[in-house]
Structures are given as C-alpha cells and as structure tokens.
C-alpha cells in the first residue's frame, strides 16, 4: 500500500471481518463516515487482512491481504487463531500516523505498529468459557492481553469496558466508550407487505431471533420459550435468522417444534431488515453480548423487543424493551403473550424502540472516534 508524503495525518484502519459480521459492519460504516467527512487534516485508508480468495472490495483506498494457500479459507477457528496472532500483525505496512485495529481478535497487532488504538467488542474468551474450543479461546485471550500495549482502547459498551478493566491493568483515562449504530436500512415498514415479500404466512404470530447458536446466545431458552408458547398458541412461528446447529436440531425434535420454526441464513441486509418488520416480537435472550446489533436493529425497525437483562443489553435498550433474567422462561412467555395480545402495548414498545434508536448513529460514532485520534496525534 503506497503512502504518499503530505502534511496530513494518515490513518490506517486494519480489519479482518467482512460486512456480514458485526465487526465488519462496524469498521465499514465507520470508514464510510470518515470519507464522508472530508476532513482536511486526515486521510483514511483501509487494510483488509485474512480475506478469502473470493473477497473483493470497491471501497476506495482499500488494500487486501488474502489468506495463505495453506490456511483454511473461511471461519475463525484454529488456523485463524494462528495467522491472526503470528502472521498478520507483521504484515501491516509502515508509514501511517496512526493505526486503528478493528477488534480485540487482532489485538497482537498493537505490538507491531505505533501509535495504535483498538476497538474491544467483548471479553467472551474470558467470560463465556464454553463459547469457543480451548485452542481458539487460548489465542483470543492472548489477543486481549496484548491490548494493554495500545495507546487507547475504544469499548462498544460500558459493560465491556468494566469487564476489561476488571481483568487487566490499564489506565482508564486512555479508554473511551463509543456505541455502535444500526444502518438506515432498518426502519419501520408495513407488516403484512413485509410478510408477503418474504413469503411468510400472513396470520400466525411471528417471533424473530437473529444470530448464531453459540452457547452465549442461549438458544435453549429460546426454544423452551417457544415450546411453552405453542401450548397456548399452536400456530406460533419462530423465524431464526442464522445457521442451525446439531444441539438445537436435537432439541427441536425432542420438543416437536419442527412445524413452528423456519430457518434462514446468509441474508442480504435489505432482506434481513424486512424480517424485523414482518415479526410481531423480537426475542433476544442472550447470556452475553458485547453490544448486540440485532437488539438495536429491532428497536430501529419498530419491532417490540423482549430480551435478557444480562451484560450490556439494558445499556442499549434503556426503557424500550421488556427485560428478564436470561433463564426465566416463564417471564419471557408472559411478556411475549402480553405483547401479542395487547395492541396498545405493542404500539407502546414500537414507539419506544424507534425513539431509543435515535440515540445511536454512525455519524456520532465516527465523530467520537476522530476525537480519540486527535487526542493521540494532537495532544
């Protein structure tokens, strides 16, 4: 990546996630806002590391480093851990005024470039030990430990910041909390029209869940809640956006829920947005979230949100959601029934969600991030 000598600050954003994942969404949205600002003292560049061979980008000032031929061409497992820790940190080009590492999963990079800041999205590797195999967890923990060498750390929630500072010795004055946002493609639409466009049944109540089936997503509570709801509302449907795993497949069969669940995966963002509009309720019972993009997307779409009260979720939702302990199936059932049966409550939480979502914008996130750059470069 050539770096032309000028009197302006050159910022390199370093990232290894594409836009179908939360971290990728974050860095591309941030980068777009920076470019839109046209700041006279800063130029921005994007380095995409660890990309599959099929990846291409039309984003300006972007360079790509593809995965070695010996590495698995997708996923974030063992070989990703090895390459992200030992290989790619050494591949970051020199000559930039500041380096912004997009996530804690690339934390080792801050030991190879300076000054460097990093965005820490979560501490899952320490807080939810069952979420990853031991080998993967080992490298993610080492990446997190490396963050203590960063010039500054951006956290995506107060909860994530507190998790980190309780685990590592780092100066709080060198931290910042900058929330994510949701794309403008998420907004209220007509429910029946959305169902027609998605080829979903028009009459039955629909619960929506978006995300993986990693242990922290608490899919067992999701399915047990559906099981109890089915007893009272036999035609209820759960729409799961995300891949189905073996454990959930077995539980679905055990609870005889096959006719009540529809799975979708790898959806373009525009299609995903319509699912929030087609649903009556968005259900998000996670045990741990660093930020929780789907919760904010639901709020912005005007879909009533019922979620767990764990980790950062109350920080994001405020009073705009019905929150319960993540293992309290009966409480979730009661709240879902209340929303489905009472139009005024549905409208109340629809309105609250839209209002709450106005507190989050990518423009604001970019402005606050630029303030961190200035603090380091223009003290």
Image (cartoon, helix red, strand yellow):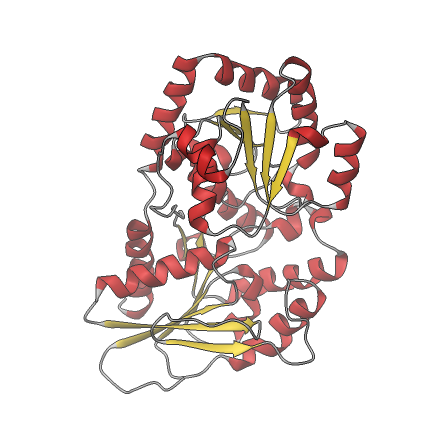
Report the front residue among 374 and 363.
Answer: 363
x, y percent for residue 273: 43, 42
Q: Position of residue 304 (x, y in %)?
A: 45, 26
Number of numbered discs overlaid on the protein picture: 0
Asked where in the image residue 226 lies, by quadrant, the reply is: top right
Q: Residue at x 45, y 82 (%)?
A: 93
Where residue 283 sits, quadrant-wise, is: top right
State the image coordinates of residue 66 (x, y, percent, origin top left).
55, 77
| Name of the residue lying farthest toward the left | 40
Residue at the spot 57% in from the left edge and 55% down from the top edge? 168
Q: Residue at x 21, y 67 (%)?
A: 39
Q: Residue at x 43, y 71 (%)?
A: 57
Q: Is residue 26 above or below residue 324?
A: below
- Is residue 179 visible from the viewing direction of this image? yes
Q: Nearer the viewer, residue 360 or 347?
A: 347
Q: Quadrant of the N terminus?
A: bottom left
Which quadrant does the C terminus fall into?
bottom left
Q: Is residue 175 above or below residue 298?
A: below
Query: Where, by quadrant of the figure, is residue 5 drawn?
Result: bottom left
In the rendered image, the vertical position of residue 99 relative to residue 358, given as above or below: below
Is 330 left, or right, of 92 in this rendering?
right
Q: Is residue 202 left or right of residue 124?
A: left
* Image coords of residue 299 (percent x, y): 41, 34
Q: Residue 157, can we see it?
A: no
């Amino acid at each position: 990546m050539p770096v032309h000598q000028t009197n302006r600050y050159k910022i390199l954003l370093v990232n290894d996630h594409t836009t179908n994942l939360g971290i990728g969404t974050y860095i591309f949205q941030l980068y777009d806002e920076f470019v839109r600002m046209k700041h006279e003292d800063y130029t921005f560049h994007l380095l995409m590391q660890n990309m599959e061979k099929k990846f291409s980008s039309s984003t300006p000032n972007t360079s790509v480093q593809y995965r070695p031929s010996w590495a698995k061409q997708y996923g974030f497992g063992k070989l990703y851990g090895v390459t992200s820790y030992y290989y790619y940190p050494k591949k970051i080009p020199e000559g930039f005024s500041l380096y912004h590492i997009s996530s804690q999963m690339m934390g080792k990079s801050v030991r190879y470039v300076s000054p460097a800041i990093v965005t820490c999205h979560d501490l899952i590797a320490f807080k939810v030990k069952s979420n990853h195999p031991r080998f993967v967890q080992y490298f993610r923990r080492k990446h997190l430990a490396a963050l203590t060498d960063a010039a500054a750390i951006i956290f995506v929630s107060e909860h994530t910041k507190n998790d980190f500072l309780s685990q590592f010795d780092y100066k709080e004055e060198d931290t910042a909390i900058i929330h994510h946002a949701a794309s403008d493609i998420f907004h209220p639409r007509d429910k029946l029209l959305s169902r027609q466009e998605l080829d979903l049944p028009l009459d039955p109540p629909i619960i929506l869940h978006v995300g993986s089936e990693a242990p922290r997503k608490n899919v067992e509570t999701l399915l047990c809640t559906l099981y109890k709801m089915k007893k009272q509302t036999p035609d209820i449907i759960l729409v799961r956006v995300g891949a189905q795993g073996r454990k959930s497949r077995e539980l679905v069969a055990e609870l005889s829920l096959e006719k009540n669940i529809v799975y979708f995966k790898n959806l373009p963002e525009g299609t995903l947005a319509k699912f929030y509009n087609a649903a009556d309720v968005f259900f998000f019972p996670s045990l741990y979230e660093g930020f929780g993009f789907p919760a904010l997307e639901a709020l912005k779409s005007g879909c009533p949100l019922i979620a767990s009260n764990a980790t950062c979720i109350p920080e994001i939702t405020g009073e705009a959601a019905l929150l319960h302990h993540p293992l309290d199936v009966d409480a979730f059932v009661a709240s879902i029934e209340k929303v489905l049966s009472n139009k005024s409550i549905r409208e109340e939480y629809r309105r609250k969600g839209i209002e709450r979502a106005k507190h989050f914008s990518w423009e604001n996130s970019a402005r606050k991030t630029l303030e961190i750059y200035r603090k380091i470069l223009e003290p």
